[in-house]
Amino acid sequence: MSENNMTPKFSLSQATDLLKRLYDLTTTEIRPLPSYEDQNFHVSANDGNEYVLKISNTEDSKNITLLEVQTYAMTYLHENGINGIPTQKVTPTNTGQLWSLQEQDSDFGRQKYLVRLLSYLPGVIISKVPLTPQLLYETGKMAARVDKVLQTMKHPNISVLDRNSRAWILSNFPQVEKDLFVLDGEPLQEVVKSVIELFRTSVAPKYSDFRKCIIQGDFNDLNILVQPEKDSCKISGLLDFGDMNSGFYIHELAITIMHMMTVHPNPIEVGGAVLAGWESELPLSEAERDSLYALVLSRFCQVVCGVRRSLLIQPENEYLIMWPKKVDHVLHDFWKQSREHVERVWFHGAENYVENNRKNKSKLKKHKTVLVLYRHLVLRTAVAAGQQQRGPHLRKDLRSHRRMDISKCTEQEDRSSPTPLRAPYALCLLRSLFGRVPRSSAVDNIPSGARRSSESHQHRGQKCRNNYKYFIFIFSLFLCVLSCLRLERQVRKKRGEGAEREDTSELKFAVAAGAVLGGAGTDY
């Protein structure tokens, strides 16, 4: 942040007045939100909606064309992403404009600030929830999706995104050399010097091989919103397009990995899952893979120096104060790791994640059908063998299971149920029990000698069929109990002794159904 760039300092009462005057909104609650260069307020209005009042700094407020392109990009992402990329929408003023210039006195005289009212996106910042491999994967995937959509965006003033002079552009990293004085007396100063040299020797010569694009430029943990769900979290919002610029795909990935490392208990492990998500949309080239390690280090050093430089101008800014606590120790530990070790963890981790994900999807696809058929199977055999004891209740359950559409069995169904049977056991059960055993076509395939017309031979044929049916039911009982025991072991192993108690009711019912089968076998 330059010394000539002034951060707005509107009070709560002034912000409330802006909302009433520009948008005809009466606030029921208003509170400040953390910000680096701008000023943001969370607003609850009398119309029942929530908003974010964003007041831009003086430098950005002078470049209205840039803010126009940023606003257009947010709308474009929301309308053109796959299933829509969750971004904020701009609420027009009373006069139909998307922004308004407002003046305020400052230490350097009267300044103009650009005011916008944005929609409030639900969720919490991603650093407030556990960073599971799946969530990191989705973060990398979202970053790549955003850049892919931005690359298709057309705007008459899109050239304004060529912001080569901006200090936060990653290709301008060597410029931090002039800010090394902010690290005087700190061990990180030597680290930054070494990374600058690494950038010049191993990254700068490869820029001609990097793929150019428009990037969001600031995929940090405070700009990504998530909504917790039953067993996971879903990305629900993407904030702050103030650093959007014409850059390179690899810059976006490096920025994303760096910021996720600052909020993860094991920072080195972040890269694998994020990289896997990114490459599911945009596989890296050889030059980009070779430069990723150095670019992540460069972004760390850029943040370390940039934040300290800004603190000299805004020493009381809480947003800036927290960054050294988040970044310094991670950079120090990261620098101790060898490049070979880091790249092995990241690239092998990405490969392992993709392979495990492929196997899990394959298993899930098989289990979807097997799980529903297994439930249908237990109910059907119980009804066939013991309908006099529990007939009305079981027939009702059976009717509901018959209405199941196996093709629409969802992952939610699988998550709410015990681990499904392995396919070989389920197939054995289906072959032996699914269908009406007393009328099985296999039973009717009796040798022709058993179908002679004499009464004695007919009696022997009937006895043969009864024995065959009895064998089928006994063998089915054995397979059913064996499968249930195996299933119970899987549940205990996967969920622990405490968790399996609530999920074994189906197991107990299956064993009970098997017992009914065993008793009913003598009827045949």
Image (cartoon, grey):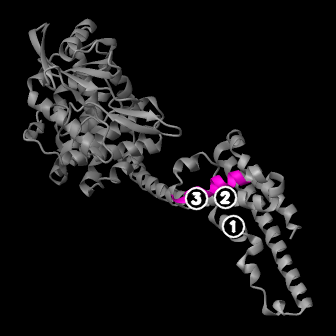
Q: What segment carries the magenta color?
A: 395-407
Measured in 3D between alpha carbons, the distance from the residue under mark 3 to the one under mark 2, in whole angstroms, is 14 Å
Which image quarter holds the C terminus? bottom right
Amino acid beneath label 1: Phe
Q: Main secondary structure of the magenta part?
A: helix
From what the image shows, is residue 244 above or below residue 316? below
Q: Secondary structure at mark 3?
A: helix
Residue labelled with disc 3:
367
Please tell me how crowded label 1 is: few (under 14), some (14-19), or many (20+) other residues with Cα within 10 Å. Answer: some
Q: Is residue 111 left or right of residue 79?
A: left
The residue sitting at 86% across, 77% down in the picture is: 467
Residue labelled with disc 1:
434
Disc nearer the start of the sequence (2/1): 2
- State the mark number for residue 376: 2
From what the image shows, is residue 487 above or below residue 26? below
Verify CB contact (< 8 Å) between mark 2 and mark 1: yes
Q: Secondary structure at mark 2?
A: helix
Q: Is residue 282 left or right of residue 242?
A: right
Q: Secondary structure at mark 1?
A: loop
Amino acid beneath label 2: His
Q: Is residue 9 among what the camera can see?
A: no
The residue sitting at 59% across, 56% down in the picture is: 403
